[in-house]
Image (cartoon, coloured by chain):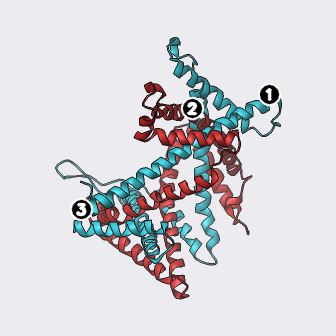
Chain colours: A red, B cyan
């Protein structure tokens, strides 16, 4: 029963979504609305599960006095500060001038932007070590990255300023992004979509069950 | 208050940047704040948007009023939403030893919904629409395309086809098929290079934004 009921739930919900695509009328349209609403609600609880799990792990770290337990305490305090403020400020918590939006603008936003920004250094460092024109394919990758990067900054056009405008680096970068890049992305996209469609079908039909985990 | 806020943002920004030197307590503190604030941010946003906005307001809808604020009728509750909440609560059972298996039900629901959606939406948008977008007149409608566009159109059509041939592993890549697959890998390498360059530039743009903040908003050196 522990495996059969989940398989049945997966099959019913999957089939309803597929049927609704072809028959957008009662009862499938109503079921589709219900399922979409339930999906949003369950998704919210799933994020709650993640947050509660983070708290559980952090508390455990403090209790066990593991190394860096102080930072686990900071995680808990930060979590509760923003959560309490967010709940206390009610539905308008995101409006400008609220403490929640202040925390977003001056704590969350700078931290998240800087976290992604420093990746530039690591990507540059990794590419310096990995990018070697060892063969023709690697050279193509290297050249395409080089043209796109240089074409996206003003110095690119300054270097190639003596050429007619359509051959300047910004135009070359734009051509690479518009044509070969689109072709490659399209091939990858179609390949991924074919894989997703077949995997989805396997899941709905109960052939693929790995998401249910082990045990009974 | 604005002044203090800028100092706090600068302190945290420099804390993250300090990782470039090496892992240190300042970075760890900033990172811990980021983790806690991020988790709390989504906790609150999803509570107000989905649990309150969708479930609570749906099950206990407010009265309908006219523009002057006069009562018109009672809202119609949608009790079906209770099923969603029950599934959501069952999801939390994963934290409880012994009854954790029951969280498979909401998980199965999520997987079923996602599979159903992907099956049709991806088939429609990422297969059919992409194929449709690839079948284009090489010389432009009414033969009006420039040489630049003609070459580009040939690259799109030929590149997509060759790329797909490369991903076809049920046949050995030999002869004409292998040659096409070889062209496919070239196109894919150009794509990876371009995507890489694009990603690096977007990260650089974020970095410039942070440098601009530090030297402009914080230190006031950039006016």
The residue identified by callout 2 is: B129
| SS label for mark 3 | loop
Q: Nearer the viewer, mark 1 or mark 3?
A: 1
Q: Nearer the viewer, residue B111 or B154?
A: B154
In this rendering, position of residue A48 left or right of residue A198: left
Furthest residue to the top? B142
- Label 2 vs label 1, nearer the camera: 1
* Residue at x 31%, y 70% (from the top left corner): B8
**Which residue lies under the disc numbered 1?**
B176
Residue under pointer 3: A97
| Visible residue check, residue A22 | no
Chain under disc 2? B
How far apart are labels 3 and 2 at the CA level?
Answer: 44 Å
- Residue B174 against residue B206 in the figure, above or below: above
Residue A190 position within the rendered picture, expressed as x and y whole percent measured from the top left = 63, 37
Per the model, the C-alpha gap separating discs 1 and 3 is 65 Å
Residue B135, located in which quarter of the rendered image? top right
Q: Quadrant of residue A111?
A: bottom left
Q: List x then y, in percent, for residue A68.
A: 51, 81
Q: Secondary structure at mark 1?
A: helix
Q: Position of residue A119 (x, y in %)?
A: 50, 58
Indicate the chain on which mark 1 is placed: B
- Residues flagged by tags 2 and 1 on a common chain: yes
């Amino acid at each position: 029963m522990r495996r059969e009921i989940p398989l049945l739930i997966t099959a019913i919900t999957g089939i309803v979504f597929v049927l609704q695509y072809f028959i957008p009328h009662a009862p499938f349209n109503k079921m589709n609305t219900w399922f979409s609403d339930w999906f949003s609600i369950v998704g919210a609880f799933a994020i709650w599960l993640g947050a509660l799990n983070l708290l559980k792990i952090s508390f455990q770290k403090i209790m066990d006095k593991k190394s860096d337990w102080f930072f686990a305490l900071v995680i808990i305090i930060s979590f509760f500060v923003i959560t309490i403020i967010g709940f206390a400020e009610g539905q308008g918590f995101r409006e400008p001038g609220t403490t929640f939006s202040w925390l977003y603008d001056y704590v969350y936003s700078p931290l998240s932007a800087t976290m992604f920004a420093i990746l530039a250094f690591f990507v540059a460092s990794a590419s310096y070590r990995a990018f070697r024109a060892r063969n023709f394919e690697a050279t193509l990758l290297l050249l395409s990255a080089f043209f796109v990067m240089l074409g996206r900054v003003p110095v690119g056009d300054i270097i190639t300023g003596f050429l007619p405008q359509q051959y300047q680096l910004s135009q070359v970068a734009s051509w690479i992004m518009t044509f070969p890049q689109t072709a490659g992305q399209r091939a990858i996209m179609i390949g991924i979509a074919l894989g997703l469609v077949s995997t989805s079908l396997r899941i709905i039909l109960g052939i693929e069950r790995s998401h249910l985990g082990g045990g009974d | 208050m604005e002044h203090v806020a800028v100092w706090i943002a600068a302190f945290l920004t420099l804390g993250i940047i300090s990782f470039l030197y090496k892992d240190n307590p300042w970075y760890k503190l900033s990172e811990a704040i980021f983790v806690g604030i991020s988790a709390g941010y989504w906790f609150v946003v999803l509570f107000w948007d989905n649990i309150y906005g969708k479930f609570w307001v749906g099950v206990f809808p407010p009265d309908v009023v006219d523009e002057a604020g006069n009562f018109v009728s009672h809202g119609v509750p949608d009790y079906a939403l209770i099923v969603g909440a029950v599934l959501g609560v069952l999801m939390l059972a994963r934290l409880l030893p012994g009854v954790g298996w029951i969280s498979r039900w909401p998980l199965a629901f999520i997987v079923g919904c996602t599979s159903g959606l992907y099956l049709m939406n991806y088939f429609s948008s990422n297969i059919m629409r992409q194929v449709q977008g690839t079948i284009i007149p090489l010389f432009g409608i009414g033969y009006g395309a420039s040489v630049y566009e003609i070459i580009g159109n040939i690259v799109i059509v030929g590149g997509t086809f060759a790329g797909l041939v490369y991903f076809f592993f049920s046949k050995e890549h030999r002869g004409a098929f292998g040659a096409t697959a070889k062209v496919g890998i070239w196109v894919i390498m150009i794509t990876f290079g371009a995507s890489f360059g694009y990603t690096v530039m977007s990260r650089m743009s974020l970095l410039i934004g942070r440098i601009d903040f530090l030297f402009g908003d914080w230190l006031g050196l950039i006016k």
